[in-house]
Structure formats: structure tokens, C-alpha cells
Amino acid sequence: MSKTPLTVNGREYTWPENPLVVVCVDGSQPAYIEEAIKAGVMPFTQKMLANGSDLRADCVVPSFTNPNNLSIVTGCPPAVHGICGNFILDPDSGEEVMMNDPKYLRVDTIMKSFHDAGGSVAVVTAKDKLRTLLGKGLDFTSGRALAFSSEKSDQVTLAENGIENVLEMVGKPVPSVYSAELSEFIFAAGVKLLESRRPDLMYLSTTDYVQHKHAPGSEGANSFYVMMDGYWKQLDALGATIAITADHGMNAKHNTADGQPKVVYLQEVMDDWLGEGVARVILPITDPYVVHHGALGGYGTVYLPEGTDMVDLCKKIEAIEGVEVALTNAEACERFELPPELVGDLVIISVADTAIGTAPARHDLSGLNEPLRSHGGISEQRVPLIFSKPVTPGAEQGRLRNFDIFNIALNHLQS
């Protein structure tokens, strides 16, 4: 097998000397690890950071799961790879759809490129909605590729996932989709796969169920990070190079006095200003798993009739309390590197402690057992960028992005 460097989406990547495990901790702003280390409950991670690299990066806006995971595994922004939300208005059909169909992914992933060149790769995610995108193009009959989710770990097949009998391998039952165990299953599987298959590249992507419920430094958060610390120690002991980032951060979006969500209901505002149904508000955070956020996030798009004065409307929206910025399609796509044809006429982003909704009746908040914590905006953009080895001098300069992680891990770590 040739070890010639590969060019993927305009970037060159060298082959890893040891198995590379890239971890995306969903919803993990830097404070989660910082507070857990301060509490003395992540001893391995504390030691890893002392001997390796503890950097910071910006994620993609909208700071949601799909755009950022696909940016990480392609090494490029949504303007290139095409995935700009969890949920969009399909320009061809005019229908509101989940953006988990691989047809929306316009480029190859780094894993696919290494697999095509003869390497072995493994992808383990929390939810199956992401697995289909991350595994696009992999030949599961080759014996060198696998991709599965902990959510559907009892349904894996060689043809569909490149592996079978996952529950037997991991030694754990199928976890609830609303649980910390959904993420723990991923790491337990990762350790078993490293022991048995030693893939060249492994990508592990968790769920942010815990971060939606628990703030950094809380008992609920720290116990989750204790769990990860133990598995990272095992991966390191097995000889892996470990690289860790997040798809986005998380912020409290509720009143401190009574714990009620702070929300700008944008469809309600548009109906009041322009007439009912004239504007169409789309919330790209929307997915089937809304118990922990009620489809309330920090980013929304608005579709408007031709002839609307977009600039004037942006000014009016920006005057609403709780709105950080309102941008035209062109402004938003240039600033956040988004594909214009998949973004609404306007992009609205809320301030850190406020969410954007459509109308109260459209959001089921009955599952919110704790005050709302969510993401999507600029205020959730800062994320960790951690490596188990030191970064070569100069590689940490400039604005780092979470989708630089493969580039740094494969090209810029000291041996």
C-alpha cells in the first residue's frame, strides 16, 4: 500500500505513524474540560494537555451538529461540502427536510480518501442520522471500513455498516438515545476496535445530551467527563494519537429568575409585521431528538417574497431585544462560508442567553426538565482543539478552526 500523501478538498494529508483517533465531543465548550480538570477529576486529560497541545478554535456557524461534523471530516467549510444545517428548506422540492441524506454532501470525506488509497477507517457516532453522512462512499465490503451508531448498534450488518455483532463486541446493551450512555457506548466501542482492528483513522462523535442539561463544572457534567477521561486513557495506552475538538459550545438560554426559556419567536414577529405566512422561518437546529432543546437554538433563516427590502428588514430585526445580528443571504454566506442556495434570504442570530423560535405553539417544551441550554450562534463558536502530542511551532498560529483537526493531527504533530 502506497503511503503517498493524499490531497483531499484542497489540503494535503500525510499518513499517520500510529492509529489516529479524532474525537468530536458534541456541545463541549472549553469550560467543560477546564472545570473538570480544576476539580481534579480528569487526571489523564490533565497530564495529556501538559505533554501535548491545548489549543482553542472556532467552529462553523451555524454552530449545529451536522455542519460542524461534516466540516471536521472533510477539512473544509459548508460552502465547499454543502451541509449547512440539521434541517433545511430544500430548494428543489420546497419541502422542509432533514439534512441527513448523503446526497447533500458534495465532497469526499478524509476517511473515504484514505480508505480509497488502501487505508482502514472506522466511524462511530451517537445517532444514526449522522452516521449515513459520515460513512458516505465507504466500501463496507472491503473489510477496511466500518461505520455505525450506538443508537442502532443492535441493527448493524456487514453490508450496511462493515461490522456485525457490535453489542457482543462492546459488552453493553443498546443505550437510550436520551442518555449519557449513548456517548459512553461510542468510546467503549472505540477501545474494542483499536484492540482488534487498529484502523489508520477512527472518528468518534458523541451526543450533547449531557451538555444541554448540565453546565460546566456541575456534578452532572463532571461525571460525564470523568467517563471520557478513562476511555481516552485506554486509547492512549493502546498506542493511538488522540485529537479532540467539539462541533459547538453551549449556553444557558433562559431567565435566571424563573428558569423559563428566553426566546425570540421570529415567525410570530414576521407574521405581525408582514402578514400571516408571508415570511417563512426555518430553524436548522430541528431534528427528531428535540426533548433536550425543543428545537430552540441560536440561529434561524427567513424566506421572503421577491421585492422585500432585505436591508431595511435586517435593521428592524436587529432592533429586537435578544437578536445579535441579522444578515442578508450574501452577507451571511460570505461571513460564515455557507452555500447561498441552501440558506434563506435572511440569517438571524441571537445573543448568548436567548434562543430563536418560530411561534410558541410550534415548540414542544414538555421534555425540558432543566432550564434551556442550547447553541447555534456566534456565542457558541469557541471550542477546544486538543492533541496528545505537541504541535510543531507555528502550526498553532492564526485563526484555528475545528475542521483543522485532521490537518494538524496528520501534518503538524511532533513525534
Image (cartoon, helix red, strand yellow):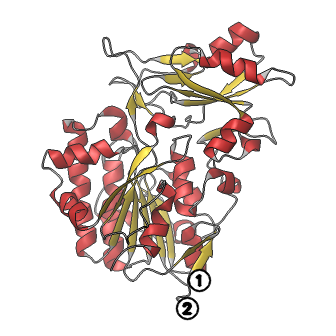
Contact, mark 2 vs mark 1 (Cβ under 8 Å): yes
Where is residue 282 shown, x and y percent of the image?
65, 29
Q: Residue at x 53, y 50 (%)?
A: 68
Q: Secondary structure at mark 1?
A: loop
Report the residue that reaches farthest toward the left.
40
Q: In which quarter of the view is residue 21 placed?
A: bottom left
Instruction: Find the distance from the CA under tag 2 to the CA under tag 1.
Output: 7 Å
The image's mark for residue 99 is none
Report whether residue 234 is seen: yes
Where is residue 58 shown, x and y percent of the image?
47, 48
Left or right placement of residue 139 versus residue 236 in this view = right
Q: Quadrant of the C terminus?
A: bottom left
Where is residue 218 shown, x and y percent of the image?
21, 35
Left or right placement of residue 148 versus residue 43 in this view = right
Residue located beneath label 1 in the image: 117
Q: Earlier in the sequence, mark 2 or mark 1?
A: 2
Crowding near pointer 1: few (<14 within 10 Å), some, many (20+)?
some
Q: Residue at x 30, y 67 (%)?
A: 388
Q: In which quarter of the view is residue 380 placed?
A: top left
The three-letter amino acid code for the residue at tag 1 is Ala
Of 283 and 294, which appears nearest the observer? 283
Q: Secondary structure at mark 2?
A: loop
Left or right placement of residue 249 versus residue 300 in this view = left
Residue located beneath label 2 in the image: 2
Is residue 232 shown above or below 206?
Answer: below
The three-letter amino acid code for the residue at tag 2 is Ser
Left or right placement of residue 87 versus residue 63 in this view = right
Is residue 96 shown above or below 266?
Answer: below
